[in-house]
Image: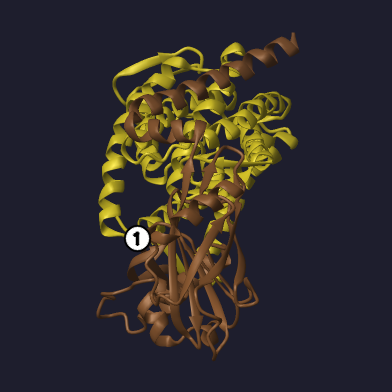
Chain colours: A yellow, B brown
Amino acid sequence: MQIYLPIAEISVNAFLLLGLGGIVGILSGMFGVGGGFLITPLLFFIGIPPAVAVATGANQIVASSFSALLAHLKRKTVDLRMGSVLLIGGLVGAAGGVSIFNYLKSLGQVDLLVNLCYVIFLGIIGALMFIESLNALYKTRSGKRQPRKKHTWIHKLPFKMRFRVTGLYISVIPPLLVGAFVGLLAAIMGVGGGFIMVPAMIYLLGMPTKVVVGTSLFQILFVTAFTTLLHATTNYTVDIVLAVLLLVGGVVGAQFGTTLGTKLKAEQLRILLALLVLIVCGKLALDLLLQPSELYSIGFSS
Amino acid sequence: MMGRVFVILLACFALVAPVQAEEDIVLGLNQTEVSISTNFSGSEIIIFGAVKRETPIPEGPELAVVVTVSGPSKAVVVRRKERKFGIWVNTDSVEVDRAPSFYAVATSGPIHEVLTRVEDLRYKISIPRAIRSVGAPMEVMDSAAFTEALIRIRTRADQYQLDEDGVTVDQQTLFRATVQLPAALVEGDYNTRIFLTRGGEVVAQYETLIDVRKVGLERWLYNLSREQSLIYGLLSLAIAISAGWLASAAFGLIRR
């Protein structure tokens, strides 16, 4: 069944979009990532103009992350206090990221820089997570337990706050900085930033994996809602018909994903996410390294 | 519908300014309006007509017919990738001032036989002539490669079409052509031109417009997104949030 998209101005298969949304939704519920780093390249691939893909992808992530967040709220695996602290940092970072993005745009080559950002960050995060999860898996098998709650310089900072759900008593400075950094990258790369946020919470803040997913979703929801509004009012690139098709698949997928996620062990969850991140990174790196079949591309002049 | 359009066009043919008065074109279209609705998946334009003349069929080369359909034009930038530091990046770019979003040429024979180069230049009929590119930057030596790439990419997407056997001519009097509009269509006025040629020279010309418009929900959403962008943005957020909540509530019920 073909459907004509009013803003993208092309006609696409409705079932293809439903399926695409569903897959991304499952990942979103399982790992607490918005799925922006997946859905945007996938939309490019089926021929949606990049600007529309980025903006509509953000809108779709609002739906799937809200659906997944509700499931996590019921299970009480969201640290609202930590989420709010991260969000404050995130919005500040996003505002800064938008101005950096516009500056890069005025220089041209913004596509290349976004792609390089993806390859570098996905590569580093994916590799680190993969190695760490393999180690953790090996240690639990051999019966050793990892020493928890290492006291580092992070615990010596002022402005301490108690995060009851997370079970942490730490300074608000690291979460604020993590939030701001993620917001900054998210605005430049046009994604929610879950794939950076999740590892940052686990490894930098030392939060337990079960709480991390819900809390990350909380932050992603607000950042992507903000991005959607920004795109709709400045670039007119949010395609509501495309978004509806994607999010119908997405919200259903997110519910399945959340159920699936609770059935897996934390280490297994982390290894799967790491593999996924590495696959996307590898695909983007190949696009940059291999000679494209068509050297020329058409863009609209402003 | 078809008959009515034919009659209207028949009535209007007196307004047409022919190149030479001897042969005139009487034209019909199967549709003068293309409506883009939600389930739009492309459309077919059938162009048919007759040659009207007061005198017998002239001696000499046989009559040929050329039909062009052209969508709204827009300036585009064609960029070329080059390998730098091991990765492929956009380097040179050429701005093409005028490139139709859709362009189809149908002829009754090989285009170089039915049309001389001079006439092609004059009426801008063939695809390379329909594109206007001036002002390639000084450092780009091979600006022709960029327009060739533009034509190549758009031809692959069916946005540019050349059908050298697309017009059938009967008894040098009746002709008929079919143009396939792709699903990815930009709205606007689609200029349709018909040329009669003899020995490559244009002897008569006719022009009409096909109106391609979004209708219904498509129209409403498009207008809303341009004129009330904040409301449109909030609407998309509201849809997203309520869809997320609905799915969550529905699954909660199923699990219980």
Q: Nearer the viewer, residue A184 or A238?
A: A238
Across and down, in percent, residue B249 comes to 63, 13
Q: Nearer the viewer, residue A72 or B104?
A: B104
Please state, as top left, top right, bottom left or bottom right, where the N terminus of chain A lies in the image: top right
Most extreme residue toward the bottom, as rendered?
A: B60
**Which residue appears at 34% of the width and 65% of the height?**
B98
Query: Which amino acid type corresponds to the residue marked 1 in the rendered image?
Result: Gln
Report helix, strand or loop for mark 1: loop
Across and down, in percent, residue B208 comes to 44, 58
**Quick check: can you spot residue B187?**
yes
Across and down, in percent, residue A253 comes to 66, 30
Provide the residue designation for mark 1: A109
**Which residue appears at 55% of the width and 89% of the height?**
B61
Is B135 placed above or below A219 here?
A: below
Picture quadrant where residue B167 is located: bottom right
Please state, as top left, top right, bottom left or bottom right, where the C terminus of chain A lies in the image: bottom left
Most extreme residue toward the top, as rendered?
A: B256
Give the class, few, some or many, for how many residues have Cα within 10 Å of label 1's Cα (few <14, many ≥20): few
Is B235 placed above or below B169 here?
A: above
Say whether residue A88 is left or right of residue A262: left
Q: Chain of mark 1?
A: A
**Quick check: can you spot residue A29?**
no
Is A178 placed above or below B21 here?
A: above
**Which residue appears at 61% of the width and 26% of the height?**
A251
Q: Nearer the viewer, residue A242 or B49?
A: B49
Picture quadrant where residue B229 is located: top left
Q: Nearer the viewer, residue A254 or A181?
A: A254
Number of marks present in the image shown: 1
Across and down, in percent, residue B17 comes to 37, 67
Say whether residue A191 is left or right of residue A29: left
